[in-house]
Image (cartoon, helix red, strand yellow):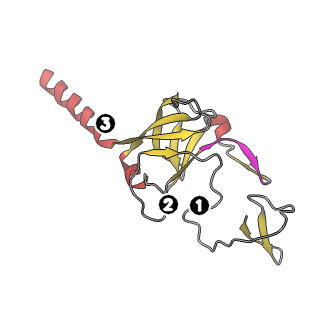
Amino acid sequence: VPILTALIALWLAWDTLSKRGPTITIAFDSAAGLTAGQSQLECKSVVMGTVKSIGVSPDFTKVIVSIETVREAEPLLTDKTIFWVVKPELFAGNITGLETLLSGSYIGMRPSAERGAPKRDFIGEQDPPVLQAWTKGTTYRLKSKRLGSISLGSPIFYRDLDVGTV
């Protein structure tokens, strides 16, 4: 019985350690509803890790979030990956993050379609990216002397059809 118990304990320990990925840190301007041990890191609604700890940087300008990731997230953690805190927002006439009203805030992750160098320390973005890495299309840069009513997230119309976003 003791040998069988030890074998089961060893198997459970190996199973837990084999599914664990690298621990990463992300610096944000604020923790904005994140909770250690509860908030998650998600990519396309798939859980890629859990917030392990939240602290303040030594100079008190940033919040440092430590995240324990799963093994599947390791190839996605490059210098081109973008992170942001998902919370309910009204942005450019669109309401986003409503699912966080019940589940709480979480960290969104957008890996790049391009290959990048592996990285473990990141700077989080204030706002979510407008375009996703897998969005097909063309990006244009337009210049104007005045902004008018155009803002980030404004729709672009061609013959009354929505064809893009600022």
Residue at image coords 60%, 47%:
125
- Can you give x and y, in whole percent of width and height, for residue 54 in the image? 51, 30
Residue 1 seen from this side: no
Amino acid type, label 3: Thr
Separation of marks 2 and 1 at Cα, in angstroms: 9 Å
Amino acid type, label 2: Ser
Query: Which type of secondary structure does the marked residue at label 3 adopt?
Result: helix
Question: Badge 3 local density, few (<14 within 10 Å), some, or many (20+)?
Answer: few
| Mark 1, residue position | 132
Q: Is residue 120 left or right of residue 26?
A: left
Separation of marks 1 and 3 at Cα, in angstroms: 32 Å
Magenta stretch: includes residue 124? no
| Mark 3, residue position | 16
Q: Which mark is residue 112?
A: 2
Residue at image coords 78%, 54%:
92
Separation of marks 3 and 2 at Cα, in angstroms: 28 Å
Quadrant in which residue 7 is drawn: top left
Seen from this angle, which residue lies furthest front?
59
Amino acid type, label 1: Gln
Mark 3 or mark 2, earlier in chain: 3
Part of the protein shown in magenta = 85-92
Question: Badge 1 local density, few (<14 within 10 Å), some, or many (20+)?
Answer: few
Seen from this angle, which residue lies furthest bottom?
159
